[in-house]
Amino acid sequence: MANDGPATCRPALPSDIPALVGLLEEIMTHHGVALPARKNLAHTLAEMLAEAETSRRPRYLFLVAEVRGRVVGACSLIFSLSTWSTGEVCELQDVVVTAHERRSGVGRLLLLNAIAHARSRGCARVFLQAEAANLDAHAFYRSHGFDEKTALHFECDLRRPAEPPTSGSAATCR
């Protein structure tokens, strides 16, 4: 569906937190991810935005896309140093456009602004992850010059109790 006005992109403000929580809950629900408590999500967003406001070179930047003053999309940029790139890199996370604004140019606007921010910081590369089944996202990222890399993503949920090591084995994540 086409949006009802020109979309704009800007850094997120603390007043955007309720809209960001809503967008993140929408995309997590879409992907079947268990939702964190709203207050925990809002607290994490507040910490990220506060660090972005107070640091000379922040590690986080949230961008929001608006149509007629309403937040309809967002993405987070996470900056870190990379040994493989021997410099700073940018990971895009939480690239989300509300369902009724998809395919209206909002995602493109967010992506182009994110890349521009990473370039202006001197980042060597930008990378992101997309769910294996999210074929529309794959096509979208490829159409914007992103190369697909083959790798498996491994993670360990440290909120679960760790299992003690058995004789002759290392401790496991769980």
Image: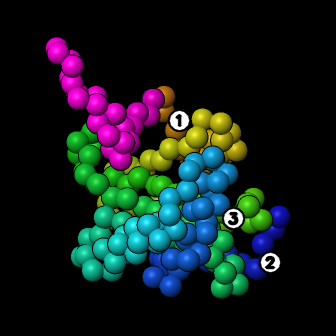
Instruction: Identify the residue at image location x=34%, y=78%.
Output: 50
First-in-chain label (3 vs 2) = 2
Mark 2 neighbour class, 10 Å CA radius: few under 14, some 14 to 19, many 20 or more: few
Q: Identify residue for label 2.
A: 4
Check if mark 3's residue and mark 2's residue have beta carbons within 8 Å. no
Quarter of image, res 61? bottom left
| Residue in the image at 23% along x and 29% along y | 164
Tell me residue 127's x, y (percent). Answer: 44, 47
Mark with earlier residue (1, 2): 2
Q: In front here: 25 or 78?
A: 25
Amino acid type at image mark 3: Thr
The kind of residue tagged 1 is Glu
Amino acid under disc 2: Asp
**Residue 39 shows in the view:** yes
Residue 38 on the magenta segment: no
Which corner quadrant of the image does residue 90 belong to? bottom left
Q: Which residue is mark 1?
A: 148
CB-based contact (under 8 Å), mark 3 and mark 1: no
Q: Residue at x 47, y 82 (%)?
A: 13
Residue toward you, 19 or 32: 32
Classify 15 as above or below 105.
Answer: below
Circle nearer the viewer, 3 or 1: 3
- State yes or no: residue 162 in magenta: yes
Q: Is residue 135 left or right of residue 35?
A: right
Q: Which residues are magenta?
A: 151-174
Q: Which mark is residue 98?
A: 3
Q: Circle 1 — which element?
A: loop
What label sits on residue 27 in the rendered view?
none
* Mark earlier in primary sequence (3, 1): 3
